[in-house]
Amino acid sequence: MPLGERPEQLHRRGRAGEHPQYVPLGGRRRDRDIADRPDGAYGKLRPTRPGEYVLMDSTRLDVFALDPVTLRWINCELTVAMDWYTRCVTGIRFTPVSTKAIDVASVLFQVFRPRPAGADWPDHAVWPEHGIPRTVLLDVDAVERPAVRRPGVSGPAMVPETIVVDHGKVFVSEHLTSVCARMGISIQPARLRTGRDKGPVERFFRTLREDLLQALPGYKGPDVHARGINPENDAFFFLDELEAIIREWVAAVYHHRPHDGLLDPHLPAVRMSPAMMFGHGLARAGYIEAPRDPDLALEFLRTEWRTIQPYGVEIDGRRHNGPALNAYRGRKSSYTGVARGRWPFQVDPDDISRVYFRDPHTRTWHTLMWEHAPALDMPFSEDALAFARKLAASRYTYPDDKVSVADLLERWNAGLGRSLAERRIALRLAREQAALDPPATEPVVSALPSVARVLDAAAQANEPELGDDDVDEPSELVMDGDFYADALEDV
C-alpha cells in the first residue's frame, strides 16, 4: 500500500488488473451488518400523513447522571416515540436502571397528550395547546397581544395508527398490547436484529449523542475506547435536569433543523424540518382529532380482571375497597372472553396504594384504596411489596402485608439493605415520578453554562461560543460505604 493511502481508498480503487478488495471499515460490528444485508433491493414503509407510523425504541445513554436522592452517578435509559412522516419526537421517558412496561405506556400517552413546555423555552419551541401549528392556523391572540405568552406544549399531539417496535420484553408485553387494543392502535414488530427497520429513530439516537450528549459533562462514549479516565467525576447533572435538557434540545433545535430525509417529491429542492413537515402534513391530510378526556391517562395503566367481593377486590393478595363498588358486589360483569364475567381494574405497578375502577353506567372513574395505604406516606411499588413479603416470610411464621411493609421501611431507614435487587427497588422508588401525570413545569436548566453553550452553538452556528467548557468539579457528596454505593455496578 502506498504511504499515506487509507484502507477505504484501497477498497474504492483496487489494484491494477484485480477486483477491488474488501477492507473492513468499522470493525466486526460493521462486518456483521454488511453480511446480514438482503440480496435484493431494500424496501421500506412509506408514511403519507402524520401519525400513520410511530417508531418506539429504548437505548442506554452514553452519559452519566446523578440521582437526586441517592446522590450517586448512575446509568439511565431513554425511551422515545417518533412520528415517521414528520420525524417529530412525540414522547420521551427517562428512567434509571432499566425501562419497564409502564414507562413505554407513558411514552405512548405523550403522543396523545404532549407534556407542557418549559417556562424559559424560546417562543419557536413552544407548540400551541390546540395542536395546529401557527403556519396553518393563525393565532389571533399572539398578533394582538404579542407580549403576553400563552401556555403551550412541548410538541404536536397525534393519534398513532400503527406503532413499529422491536422484540424487547417491554414492547411485546401484555400491558402495551392491551393499551393498543383499547386505543385502536396496530402493532407492527420489526424484524429480528434488523435495526434498519427503525432507521429514523436509530439515527435520532446517534444525532442526540453527537450533537448534545458528547458536549455535556459526564459523557462516557459508546464504548471503552471513547471513554475518558473518570467521566463519573464530571456528572453533575441530576436525572430530572438531564431529561429537561434533552426535551429542550429536541423542541428548540431538533424539531426546527432541516433534515436531508424530509422532502416533498413535488419540491425536491426544499429541505424541511420536522416542524415544517408536520405543518405540511396537516395542511395536506387534515387536522388531527386527539382525545381530550382528562382521565385519558388511566387508559394507559395495566388492566387486571377481578371479581368484586363483599370485602372489595383482591389483586395479587392486596385488598382494595371503596363506595363505588357497593352496587356491583357479588355480581358478574357483561364482559366475555378472557374476562369471564370479571371486572376490569386499572393498576399502576409503581403505586399500588390505589387502583381505579370505571363505573359501567356513569362512565366515571373511581379510586379504590389499599387497606394498608394509610400506613404509607409515599408511593409503593409491586416489586417493593414482593420483596417485603419474601423478607417477612423468612422471619415470621404468619406474616401479613402490614408487618412486611413496616419491616421493609425500617430496614431501609436503618441502611441495612444489602442485596443488589433490593437497592435497585429502593432507587426506583426514590426517583419515581408519576409516569402518566406529568408536572406542570419543567426544571429550569437554561442557566447552566454547558446547556446554554450547547443550545446556542446548535441554534446559532455563526455566533461565537458562550463561555468555555470548564466547570468546577462537584464536591464529594457521598461517603464511602453508602447504602446505594454499588446499586448499579456493571449495569
Image: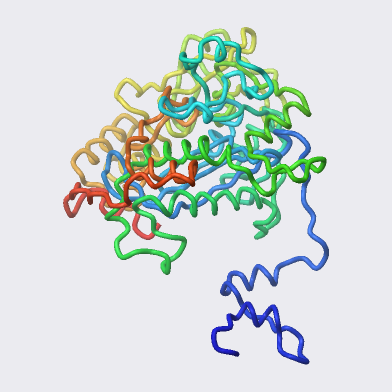
Residue at left 21%, top 46%?
416
- Residue 408, by quadrant, is top left
Rendered view: 281 above or below 475:
above
Question: Which quarter of the rendering shows the C terminus?
Answer: bottom left
- Residue 137, by quadrant, is top right
Specify whether residue 461 is in view.
yes
Q: What percent of the width, then of the height, locates residue 105? A: 56, 35
Residue at left 49%, top 50%?
211
Nearer to us in this view, 429 or 412: 429
Residue at left 43%, top 33%?
350
Question: Which quarter of the rendering shows the N terminus?
Answer: bottom right
Nearer to us in this view, 132 or 268: 268
Q: What percent of the width, then of the height, locates residue 54? A: 67, 39
Q: What percent of the width, then of the height, locates residue 394? A: 30, 46
Rendered view: 74 above or below 163:
below
Give the left or right position of residue 365, taking residue 231 as reference: right
Give the left or right position of residue 327, taking residue 420 as reference: right
Nearer to us in this view, 382 or 197: 197
